[in-house]
Image (cartoon, helix red, strand yellow):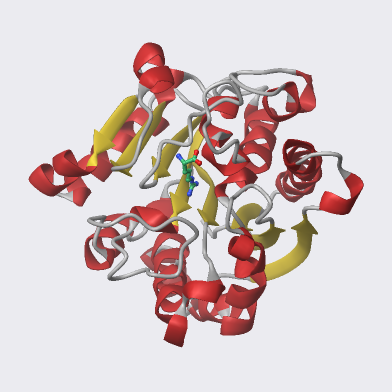
Amino acid sequence: MSQPVLHIVGAAVGEGASDGGCKWGSNALKEHGLQRALAATGRTVTWGETVSAQPMLASSRLGAIEGFSEHLAQTVAQVLHHRQQPLVVGGDHSCAVGTWSAVAEHLRPQGRVGLVWIDAHLDAHTPDTSDTQAPHGMPLAALLGHGSVGMTDLFGWRGKLLPSQVAIIGARSYEPALLNQLGVRVMYMPEVLERGFAACFAEARAIASTGTAGWGISFDLDGLDPRDAPGTGTPVEQGIRLADALQALDGCSHDPQFVAMELTEYNPLRDFGGQTARAATALLCTVLAPSAATLELAA
Ligand SMILES: NC(=[NH2+])NCCC[C@H](N)C(=O)O
């Protein structure tokens, strides 16, 4: 069966982070040729709206992210409504609230969405626990139902993700309190180094796809080692190697239950020579390339 049209939504948001450079990430990846590279794999790819955060229309940073989340969620909901597969390209990681709230709302009549969250950070702060008050440190908490109402209650309900259907890989800079309390499976970097990324990803995928109506990946580029991806908003040493990620993620979207993909925290202002843009493009092509069967049919 052929795969759906892949529809890219740019998430031009950097206001969620202390360094706002990720606001320019989606446009930089567009200029770098992301759509062309994805189309070259054989997918039909369209690039629709780029949703921008509007700090001038908000009275606070959190307010700007709440307004942005609402706008992004409506945009992603439309993509799903048209039976296309959304690829959200950030943007700082606060965009996850809009992306996965829309996916959860869309799947709600059939069941839940499960999520593999690849990241150096846990992004599970609430305004009550965050030292930085940076909303990009809060999206996972919000999706699990904790935090500011403007982030937790999109579409009028909260708890877009269930703790037992989320797994995090690559964490190495963290605040474990909330996720420990909720029982979310976190594979910290020492475990990834010991077992290998492929084994960790297989476990995470099983967590996200078992008993759910669909699953997806939220890939924060800072989950990668800065030697492979230096151009990110908040880099942390000793991460996942790009080659390991490429190998393990190959072809995940062939699974009919794979519903959406998100790539975040690309900061072109720190990406001298485009190394990180190439890494991001390779990752997305690897995950989203059509199945061998589709290629054969097209030949
Ligand atoms: N998605 C990210 N890069 N998050 C970084 C969060 C950094 C830090 N834990 C904070 O809350 O401010």
Q: Quick check: 85 above or below 8?
A: above
Q: Residue at x 24, y 67 (%)?
A: 243
Q: Residue furthest front?
A: 131
Count of all numbered marks drawn on residues in the image: 0
Q: Quadrant of residue 229?
A: bottom left
Tell me the residue at 51%/28% (across/down): 125
Q: Position of residue 36 (x, y in %)?
A: 58, 81
Residue 160 figure quarter: top right
175, 203: nearer the viewer: 175
* Residue at 21 percent of width and 50 percent of height: 197
Q: Nearer the viewer, residue 49 or 237?
A: 237
* Image location (x, y in percent) of residue 117: 42, 41
Query: In x, y percent, where is residue 251?
Result: 36, 59
The residue located at (31%, 41%) in the rendering is 169
Between 55 and 168, the one lying in front of the other is 55
- Residue 63 seen in render: yes
Q: List the single residue furthest toward the bottom.
A: 273
Q: Is residue 97 above or below residue 109?
A: below
Residue 164 shows up from this direction: no
Q: Residue furthest right?
A: 57
Left or right? Give the position of 133 relative to 66. Answer: left
In the image, taking residue 170 as reference, residue 41 lies left or right, namely right
